Amino acid sequence: MNLMMALLTNFSLATLLVIIAFWLPQLNAYSEKTSPYECGFDPMGSARLPFSMKFFLVAITFLLFDLEIALLLPLPWASQTTNLNTMLTMALFLIFLLAASLAYEWTQKGLEWTE
């Protein structure tokens, strides 16, 4: 009974919000909305502008390194485990993997912005 009441309430609120958004007046674009915001791109222009593939590769590399560092964050709490040798071995392996992949990116000039 409580589940049905919660589902009915959620559905009713969602429907009400959609109806209100549909019936609200459409706001016209004015000069502040059409001016470039922070990045310098025209907000009313095409959103499919080309960008450098080098930027894309650096961004993906950053995400991968960031993920590896995020895996290192819970290590202080892992030191409370009963098998400390396994935890230290895995932590050192992860740090070695991070350092080796950074060295590989550096030698392959993957971190260079210009060629």
Image (cartoon, rainbow, N blue to C red):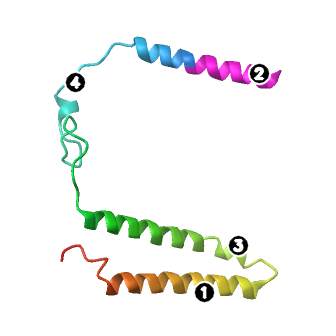
> In front: mark 2 or mark 4?
2
Nearer to me, 35 or 90 = 90
The percent coordinates of residue 111 (x first, y second) are 31, 77
Q: Kindly identify which residue carries mark 1.
A: 92
The answer to whether the residue labelled 4 contacts the one labelled 3, judged by CB atoms less than 8 Å apart, is no
**Which of the two discs, 1 and 2, sits closer to the camera?**
2
Q: Position of residue 42 (x, y in %)?
A: 18, 40
Amino acid on which the number 2 mark rests in the picture = Met
The residue under the point 24% across, 47% down is 38
Mark 3 crowdedness (10 Å alpha carbons): few <14, some 14-19, many ≥20: few
Tell which tag, 3 or 1, sits nearer the viewer.
1
Stretch of the chain drawn in magenta: 1-14
Q: Which residue is mark 3?
A: 77
Where disc 4 sits, the SS reads: loop
Task: Report helix, strand or loop for mark 1.
Answer: helix
3D distance between C-alphas at marks 2 and 4: 42 Å
Q: Residues within 10 Å of mark 2 (few under 14, many from 20)?
A: few
- Residue 4 numbered mark, or none: 2
- In primary-sequence order, the first of circles 3 and 2 is 2
Query: How would you classify the magenta stretch by its main secondary structure?
Result: helix
The three-letter amino acid code for the residue at tag 1 is Leu
Sequence-wise first label, 3 or 1: 3
User: Could you say which is closer to the camera, residue 10 or residue 38?
Assistant: 10
Q: Is 11 included in the stretch rendered in magenta?
A: yes
Left or right relative to 49: residue 23: right
Q: Residue at x 53, y 72 (%)?
A: 68
